[in-house]
Image (cartoon, rainbow, N blue to C red):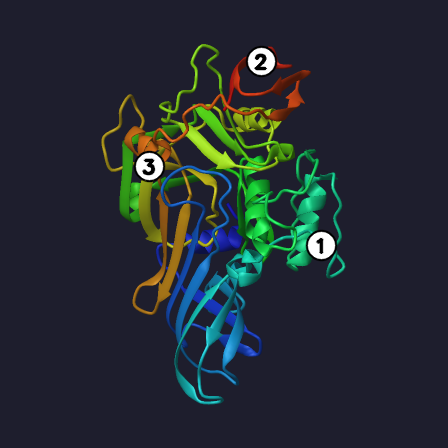
């Protein structure tokens, strides 16, 4: 939940309120009178719980305006409440976008602009060769933090994120057999960011002011009551609980590819059929230690499906865990039905007719959907060999099933296949 002032929060929740939208594009400033429609869409996953996503936010603006030029535009979008400067709230920024506009110079017309945040730039889809360029330099082995700083410098983006103390022994490459001069040999910048996000049980995104952030599910104090919503669907039967971590580890020390499965059941082997509640992700420089950390962070976490539409607030953030309350049904044992839900998708819309609206989706994957996602493609292979970094003094060589005792005295089941 984005931090806002008490004045902003109070005015946003009033029954009668005045919404003020401001869009800044260089010297051009648009307000309510100029805007026909505005839509902002952010998501970290539309099909269920996951980690390692790098989806970019998008904006669509339809406005009557005068542009002094045609071409790329940079947009900053703000929302506030009240028009009287003395009594109005402060503005909250909803996004920082790059779009394209076409309009005869210095003529007023209705213009449509579709834009994306910086992760939507083609520069992030270019290959990351880790070459010395643009003042950025990286040699291996290195820390994951150094890798992140290299990527940010090369793509000219800021981040305040601090990685865990993972070390990367050699350059991650997509196709080790290809020649170094072959551009396809390497991962893209967006893929490298995805792997760093996955390593931290997070999803990568650009925040409302244009910084790279890594989003993990976080508990919010906010409650969403059905009585405050225009539409509200809380599906108590659709609940997702993390029961295992499936980490795809590729090109480990260039000796081959492997997968690591970890859960808290030392007696159940992974056979490709255990799919319900499994979080699946990829990180070429992953390890058993990383899988263990991911399980410690995510194991047992659960939430429900919910979808609601309400008057826009502007403080809702991706990854927020909010309490959805069905306060229009009878209480059970003195309480309304309430469930924890995650903000996985948030969409803001503004128009003169509809005002400022907010649509939120929390999707909890059911067992059938889990089965379709994972299927039986992950059958254990006992061919080949792979050397994985040690965890708590244990080194795993080759493929097989292992039970490890962690420092916390808890038994963990590990399958490497």
Q: CA distance from mark 1 to mark 2?
A: 39 Å
- Front of the two marks 2 and 3: 2
Q: CA distance from mark 3 to mark 1?
A: 44 Å
Q: Residues within 10 Å of mark 1 (few under 14, many from 20)?
A: few
- Front of the two marks 3 and 1: 1
The residue at 61%/14% (across/down) is: 406
Please, is residue 382 above or below residue 186 in the view? above
Q: In the figure, is residue 128 to the left or right of 328?
A: right
Please, is residue 218 above or below residue 82 in the view? above
What numbered label is drawn on residue 77? none
Q: In the figure, is residue 134 to the left or right of 62?
A: right
Q: Does label 3 or label 1 sit earlier along the sequence?
A: 1
What percent of the width, then of the height, locates residue 261?
Answer: 49, 24
Q: To which residue does mark 1 refer? A: 131
- Front of the two marks 1 and 2: 1
Q: Does label 2 or label 3 sit earlier along the sequence?
A: 3
What percent of the width, then of the height, locates residue 127?
Answer: 59, 55
Quadrant in the rendering for residue 60? bottom left
Q: To which residue does mark 2 refer? A: 404
What numbered label is drawn on residue 305? 3
Dots 1 and 2: beta carbons under 8 Å?
Answer: no
The residue at 59%/33% (across/down) is: 286
The residue at 41%/25% (across/down) is: 379
Q: Does label 1 or label 2 sit earlier along the sequence?
A: 1
């Amino acid at each position: 939940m984005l931090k806002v002032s008490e004045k902003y929060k109070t005015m946003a929740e009033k029954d009668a309120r005045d919404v003020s939208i401001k869009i800044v594009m260089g010297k051009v400033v648009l307000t309510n009178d100029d805007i026909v429609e505005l839509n902002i869409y952010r998501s970290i996953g539309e099909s269920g719980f996951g980690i390692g996503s790098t989806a970019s936010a998008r904006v669509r603006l339809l406005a009557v305006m005068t542009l002094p030029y045609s071409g790329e535009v940079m947009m900053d979008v703000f929302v506030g409440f009240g028009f009287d400067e003395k009594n109005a709230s402060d503005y909250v920024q909803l996004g920082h976008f790059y779009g394209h506009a076409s309009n005869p110079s210095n003529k007023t017309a209705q213009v449509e602009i579709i834009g994306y945040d910086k992760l939507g730039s083609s520069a992030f889809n270019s290959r990351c060769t880790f070459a010395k360029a643009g003042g950025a330099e990286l040699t291996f082995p290195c820390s994951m933090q150094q890798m992140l700083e290299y990527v940010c410098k090369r793509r000219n983006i800021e981040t305040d994120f601090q990685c865990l103390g993972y070390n990367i022994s050699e350059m991650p490459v997509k196709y080790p057999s290809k020649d170094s001069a072959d551009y396809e040999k390497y991962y893209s910048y967006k893929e490298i960011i995805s792997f760093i996000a996955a390593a931290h049980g997070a999803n990568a995104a650009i925040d409302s002011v244009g910084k790279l952030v890594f989003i993990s599910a976080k508990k919010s104090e906010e409650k969403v009551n059905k009585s405050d919503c225009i539409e509200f669907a809380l599906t108590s039967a659709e609940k997702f609980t993390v029961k295992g971590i499936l980490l795809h580890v590729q090109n480990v020390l260039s000796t081959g590819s492997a997968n690591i499965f970890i859960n808290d059941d030392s007696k159940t082997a992974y056979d490709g059929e255990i799919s319900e509640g499994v979080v699946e992700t990829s990180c070429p420089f992953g390890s058993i230690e990383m899988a263990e950390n991911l399980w410690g962070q995510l194991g047992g976490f659960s939430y429900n499906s919910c979808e609601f539409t309400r008057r826009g607030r502007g403080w809702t953030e991706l990854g927020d865990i909010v309490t959805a309350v069905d306060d229009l049904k009878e209480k059970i044992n003195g309480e309304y039905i309430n469930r924890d839900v995650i903000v996985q998708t948030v969409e803001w819309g503004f128009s003169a007719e509809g005002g400022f609206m907010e649509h939120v989706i929390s999707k909890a994957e059911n067992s059938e959907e889990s089965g379709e996602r994972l299927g039986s493609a992950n059958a254990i292979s006992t061919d080949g060999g792979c050397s994985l970094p040690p965890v708590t003094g244990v080194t795993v060589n080759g493929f097989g099933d292992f039970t490890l005792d962690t420092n916390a005295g808890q038994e963990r089941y590990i399958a490497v296949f």
